[in-house]
Image: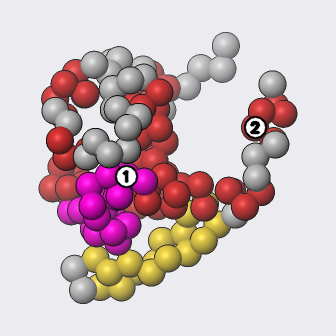
Amino acid sequence: MCRIFVSADPASYESRTRSVRLHGVVTSVRLENLHWAVLEEIAARDGLSVAHLIETLYDELVAERGAVGNFASFLRVCALRYENLIAQGLIPRDASVPIRSLDAERVLGALPRPVAAWRGQRSLS
């Protein structure tokens, strides 16, 4: 089982720092190359630069939650969630279909209810 994971190209899990501008303020974000690649794909689907995608995600997160905790972790979860939604068939695999064209309520409505592990109540059994 583990060979499937450990055979990954080491370059995919090397970290890279990028400087981004969030409303005129320059900040840096450090992510693994694989996460950057997924964010690049998400951005390209809607004709955005990665910097613009990150700024949009930041703004929408602040509007929804009122604050931003660990933004780099949030971006990692965005990349993983994107891949998971594709695997579930809730986002088309065809990268020419813009994310903005999808019905967010339909996609979100098809997701399973949150489990206890997502609320910090993790079971290892």
Q: Is residue 47 visible?
A: yes
Farthest top residue in view? 125
Residue drawn 20% across the image and 56% down it = 60
- Taking 40 as reference, is 115 above or below it? above
Q: Residues within 10 Å of mark 1 (few under 14, many from 20)?
A: many
Chief secondary structure of the magenta portion: helix
| SS class, disc 2 | helix
Name the residue beneath numbered marker 2. 5
- Image coordinates of residue 47 in percent, x first then y, are 27, 61
| SS class, disc 1 | helix
Kindly indicate the quadrant of the structure image that contains residue 81: top left
Tag 1 or tag 2, which sits nearer the N-term?
Answer: 2
Residue drawn 67% across the image and 13% down it = 125
Kind of residue sitting beneath label 1: Ile
Q: Mark 2 or mark 1: which is in front?
A: 1
Residue drawn 22% across the image and 50% down it = 65
Residue 87 left/right relative to 10: left
Q: How is the image coloured?
A: secondary structure
Name the residue beneath numbered marker 1. 42
Q: Is residue 70 visible?
A: no
- Image coordinates of residue 45 in percent, x first then y, are 32, 52
- Taking 43 as reference, is 117 above or below it? above
Residue drawn 22% across the image and 21% down it = 109
Q: Which residues are magenta?
A: 41-59
2 and 1 marks in contact (CB < 8 Å):
no
The circle drawn on residue 67 is none
